[in-house]
Image (cartoon, rainbow, N blue to C red):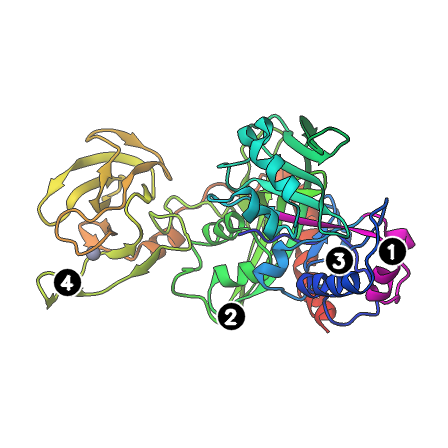
Amino acid sequence: MTGYLCQDIPLNSNQSEPQKSSDLIASLQAEQSARPSKFSTAHKLMAFVCGIFMLGGGGAFAVANMQAGSAEEITQRMVASDVSSLVAGQNLSSLVGQQNFLLYRSERLQANDTAESLLERLGVSDPSASAFLRRNALVNQNLWGRHGRFVTAEVNNNFELERLTVRWVTDDSGKFQRLTVKQSETDDGFEAVLDQGDLTRTSRLAHGVIQSSLFAAADAANLPDPVAIQLAEMFSASVNFHKDLRKGDTFTVVYEALEADGEPLRSGRVLSAEFVNKGKPFQALWFQENEGDKGAYYALDGSNLRRAFLATPLEFSRVSSNFGSRFHPIKKTWRNHNGIDYAATTGTPIRTVGDGVVKESGWSNSYGNVVYIDHGGNKVTVYAHMSRRDVKTGERVSQGQVIGAVGSTGMSTGPHLHFEFRVNGEFKDPQIIARESVAAAPIAKATKQRFDALAEATRMKFEVAPLMMQASAE
Ligand SMILES: [Zn+2]
C-alpha cells in the first residue's frame, strides 16, 4: 500500500470538493496546451491528499481534507513549498495559466519497473531523462530492482524531469540514503549524487470506519498495512478480526512514522489505538514505565493487554482467514472438528500462542508435520499440516516464537493450519482462553500518575478524531 497522510494545508480554503490530483493534472495539461510557457524558477503549486496529520506527538492537529481518495489519487501526491504566494480563494487554474510551475509526484518503485514505466507513472515525458536513468551507474546500483523504494519527481511545465529523488533506509542508524538525479550543464544533461540525510520521527493519527473489512477501511484511511496488522494484533484477545467485525465499527490510531525530507518512508509502532466493535470500545496505549524498559500496551485504566496466550497462532494478514468447517473434506463426513482451521499460503510463519515445552515435533498420517506444545497446567496446543517444523521435541519455546510454517501435509486438501487448544484433553476456544488467561502486571503505583495523564490525553484524541473527520467531510 502506498497511501500517506497529508501534512499540507489546503491550497484553497473555499474549496468544498477535494482536489483530485488526476483532475489537477488534467487541468494543468489543458492550461499548458492553451498557453505554452518556458520553464523558469517556477512557483510551486500545492495540492493535497486526505488525512489528518498530527505533529510530533503533541496535541495539535492540523486537518487537511479528510475525504478518502482512491489509491491512485493518494499515490499521485503533489506537494509544493511556495505557499505564501497563493491567496486563499484564488482559482487554481487561473494561477496555472499565469505562472510556470513544478509538479511534485511520488511513487513506490515496483518490482518490474523500467525507466519508462516509472517516469510514466510520475507524469514525466522526457526521453533524455529516461536514457540517463537507464545508463547511469549510481541509478543502476540503487534503483532498478529495488522495489518499494520511494521515488519523488519534480516535473516542469513541459513534463520534463527537473529532479528525481530516491529515498530509502538500510539500517537503524537514524539515517536514510538519498539518490538525487538532477538537470545539469554536462553533456548528459543530468547528474546523479548519492548522500545521506537524517530521519525524523513524527506521529500520525488516522481514523476509519469499517465498511467491508479492516484492510479496506485501512486503505481508505491511508493507514499502512503494518499499522493495520498491529491494530488487529493488539486487540486480538477481545476482537476476532476475521469474524467479529461489523459495518460501522470504527478505529482511531496514533502511530509513529519515520520521515525523510518530510516524506513518510516507514511506519513504526502504534502509540495508541481505539477500536469500537459493535458499539463497544477497546482502547490501548503504549507505555514504558522507565526509559529503556521494554514497554507494553495497556488499557486506559492501566491494566496490561498482554495475555499468557495469544488468540491466534498466525499473525493477522490480508490473506489469512479462519474457517471452522466441521465437514471432513477427505472422509466426506460430518465430524466433531476439534480445532480451528486457518487458511493461509504455504510458508506463512506459525507461532506458539504461549510459553512452553515442545512435547512432540513429528509426523502423523492425518496431521502430517505436527507440533504439540505443553504449556503446563494441563494445557496443550497442537499445530498440524505444517510444511516445515522449526522446533525439536523437548525444546523450550516462548510466546510468539515461530515453530514452523503453514503447509498441506497429512490429510489436507489445501494449505492451512489446523490448530487445537486442549485443556485437560478437551478442545477449547482459543479466543476465550486468550481473553481469560492471566494478564501481565498492571501499571506500577509509582508511575500510575504519569500514566493517567497520558491516558487522559489519549482519551481526548479518541473523542476528537471522529468529530474532525465529520467536520472535514462536510
Ligand atoms: Zn482442521
Viewer-proximal residue among 211 and 393: 211
Q: Give residue 98's position: percent from left, percent from top.
A: 89, 60
Looking at the image, which residue sits at the far front?
Answer: 187
Of the numbered discs 3 and 4, the one sitting upstream in the chain is 3
Could you classify mark 2 by the number of other residues whose Cα lies within 10 Å: few (under 14), some (14-19), or many (20 or more)? Answer: some
Of the numbered discs 4 and 2, the one sitting upstream in the chain is 2
- The residue to which callout 4 is attached is 329
Helix, strand or loop at mark 3: loop
Ligand 1 lies in quarter? bottom left
Q: What's the residue at 28%, 41% (across, down)?
A: 405
Viewer-proximal residue among 62 and 59: 62
- The residue to which callout 3 is attached is 47
Q: How far is the residue under mark 1 from the one under mark 2? A: 43 Å
Of the numbered discs 1 and 2, the one sitting upstream in the chain is 1
Amino acid under label 1? Gln
- Tell me if 197 is positioned left or right of 374 in this view: right
Q: How far is the residue under mark 1 from the one under mark 3? A: 16 Å
Could you classify mark 4 by the number of other residues whose Cα lies within 10 Å: few (under 14), some (14-19), or many (20 or more)? Answer: few
Of the numbered discs 1 and 4, the one sitting upstream in the chain is 1
Amino acid under label 2? Gln
Q: Is residue 1 among what the camera can see?
A: yes
Helix, strand or loop at mark 1: loop
Magenta-highlighted residues: 81-106
Helix, strand or loop at mark 4: loop
- The residue to which callout 2 is attached is 211
Mark 3 and mark 4 in contact? Answer it, CB < 8 Å. no
Viewer-proximal residue among 285 and 144: 144
Q: How far is the residue under mark 1 from the one under mark 4? A: 68 Å
